[in-house]
Image: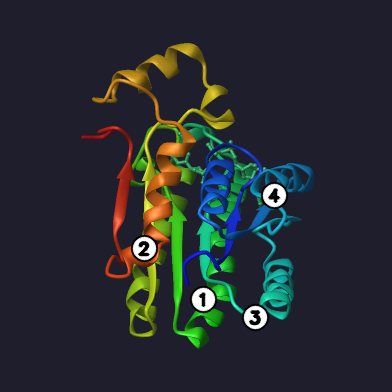
Amino acid sequence: MQNKRISIVTGAGRGIGAGIATRLAMRGDSVICVDIDVQAAEAIAAECGERSIGIGLDVSDSAAVNTFVADLIDRYSQIDVLVNNAGINRDAMLHKMTDEAWESVIAVDLTGVFNLCRAVGAQMRTASYGRIVNVASASWMGNIGQTNYAAAKAGVVGLTRSIAKELAFKQVTANAVCPGFILTEMTKAMPPQLFDVQLAKIPLGRPGEPSDVAKVIDFLTSDDAAYVTGEVINVGGGYKL
Ligand SMILES: NC(=O)c1ccc[n+]([C@@H]2O[C@H](COP(=O)([O-])OP(=O)(O)OC[C@H]3O[C@@H](n4cnc5c(N)ncnc54)[C@H](O)[C@@H]3O)[C@@H](O)[C@H]2O)c1
């Protein structure tokens, strides 16, 4: 299996997803870089090398996800690794949370993960092999201003643990990774005072880099992690300790 993997990474166009895609490509995977921003997906695929491709896809569109996965299976016959990383946030206090902010975050961060897991999980079940990693967040435990995001990410944890139980007998593993405070466009957009508050919560004394998350996902999607499933792994420098 080593060095012949077909691996899907969603939200690969930038940030943590770009870090994961390039890391998996470094070990020899053919990486299918998926992003709603097709140009960003193609640019990262080019960095990954000639066996990787960039695809424009909205993970919340279930019909489009099903077509995308069917096309991939036609082309490669097997998908070995699925990393659901695409995510958005629309933070607001509960009393100011709009329907749009609630629905869009649930659609991308939770339903998007379900859409990919269902389509790819069916093939992994048939193949009796697979590695699924879903990127949740330390916020799944609850966070001020993030009722929508925390609900979606807690949903991802429950979904992942259920998949782990359901597909273990087929040697398919499923784990959730919870980044703490990682330097990406998502966090750079924060007001400086909020940024400093987050930084103060990290015992290791620095924000994370996308590569800190990518290294853990590299392990979880390797053959060495064959006996690790249903886990929820924090990657946050001690954030939330
Ligand atoms: N940065 C952090 O500190 C942090 C902390 C905890 C969890 N996370 C999670 O890690 C993941 C990546 O975060 P990031 O900071 O790199 O974010 P980011 O905003 O920098 O990148 C997210 C990527 O997902 C893509 N995307 C958005 N909606 C999509 C859709 N509907 N379909 C396909 N692609 C879509 C975007 O175009 C973008 O390229 C997210 O799930 C996020 O919730 C991030």
Of the residues shown, which amino acid type is indicated by label 3? Answer: Ser
Crowding at mark 2 (Cα within 10 Å: few <14, some 14-19, many 20+): some
Dot 4: element:
helix
Residue at label 3? 77
Of the residues shown, which amino acid type is indicated by label 1? Answer: Gly
Determine the CA span between mark 4 and mark 3: 20 Å
Of the residues shown, which amino acid type is indicated by label 4? Answer: Ala
Which quadrant of the render holds ligand 1? top right
Which of the 4 image quadrants contains residue 240?
A: top left
Residue 99 is left or right of residue 239, and the answer is right
Asked if labels 1 and 3 touch by Cβ distance under 8 angstroms, the answer is no
Q: Nearer the viewer, residue 184 or 106?
A: 184
Residue 114 is left or right of residue 50, and the answer is left
Asked if labels 2 and 4 touch by Cβ distance under 8 angstroms, the answer is no
Q: Residue 13 has which mark?
A: none
Determine the CA span between mark 1 and mark 2: 16 Å
Q: Residue 121 has which mark?
A: 1
Pointer 4 or 1: first along the chain? 4
Pointer 3 or 1: first along the chain? 3
Pointer 1 or 2: first along the chain? 1
Give the number of the mark in front: 3 or 1: 3
Which quarter of the image is occupied by the C terminus?
A: top left
Pointer 4 or 3: first along the chain? 4
Determine the CA span between mark 4 and mark 1: 23 Å
For the point 52% across and 16% down, the residue is 191
Residue at label 2? 158
Asked if labels 2 and 3 touch by Cβ distance under 8 angstroms, the answer is no
Locate residue 151, reporting x and y percent: 43, 50
